Image (cartoon, rainbow, N blue to C red):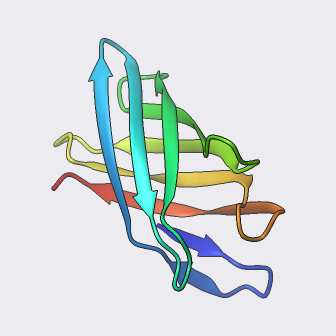
């Protein structure tokens, strides 16, 4: 995923996410690690709001980190591309960015 910092710099952060789905509901768990920081775990819940459009809420249990991820599933069903907006764990303020997730 990519996050835009206050100074306009775009930072790329490798993330591993596991999603499960049923009917139109989706849930998942993500893990990432910033340099010299402990691993961060995010929980996702949401679902399809249209055939290819997915809206997910995310949160880091026990912290203020949370937000919304709106993404589009490609026609092959293997790639999610979208944007997120929320409250950052390290920055302790609003954050936003883009993410492109590809099925491994």
Question: Where, by quadrant of the figure, is residue 9 drawn?
Answer: bottom right
Residue beneath the point at 16% across and 43% down: 76
Quarter of the image containing the C terminus? Answer: bottom left
In the displayed structure, would residue 104 be above or below residue 20? below
Residue beneath the point at 41% across and 29% down: 27
Q: Between 93 and 34, which is closer to the camera in this rendering? A: 34
Position of residue 41 in the picture relative to residue 21 (left or right): right
Q: Residue furthest right?
A: 93
Image x and y of residue 42, in percent: 52, 47
Q: Between 47 and 49, which is closer to the camera in this rendering? A: 47
Question: Where, by quadrant of the figure, is residue 57 drawn?
Answer: top right
Question: Where, by quadrant of the figure, is residue 90 drawn?
Answer: bottom right
Residue beneath the point at 68% across and 45% down: 66
Position of residue 104 in the picture relative to residue 91 (left or right): left
Position of residue 52 in the picture relative to residue 77 (left or right): right
In the displayed structure, would residue 49 be above or below residue 11? above
Image x and y of residue 38, in percent: 53, 70
Position of residue 11 in the picture relative to residue 87 (left or right): left
In the displayed structure, would residue 8 be above or below residue 84? below
Residue beneath the point at 46% across and 66% down: 1
> How many numbered marks are there?
0
Image x and y of residue 61, in percent: 62, 40
Image x and y of residue 7, in percent: 78, 88
């Amino acid at each position: 995923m990519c996050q835009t910092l206050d100074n306009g710099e775009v930072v790329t952060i490798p993330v591993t996410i596991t999603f499960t789905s049923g009917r139109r509901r989706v849930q998942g768990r993500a893990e990432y690690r910033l340099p010299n920081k402990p691993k961060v775990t995010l929980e996702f819940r949401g679902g399809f709001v249209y055939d290819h459009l997915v809206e997910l809420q995310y949160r880091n249990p026990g912290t203020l980190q949370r937000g919304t991820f709106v993404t589009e599933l490609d026609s092959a069903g293997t790639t999610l591309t979208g944007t997120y907006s929320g409250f950052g764990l390290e920055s302790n303020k609003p954050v936003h960015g883009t993410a492109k997730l590809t099925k491994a």
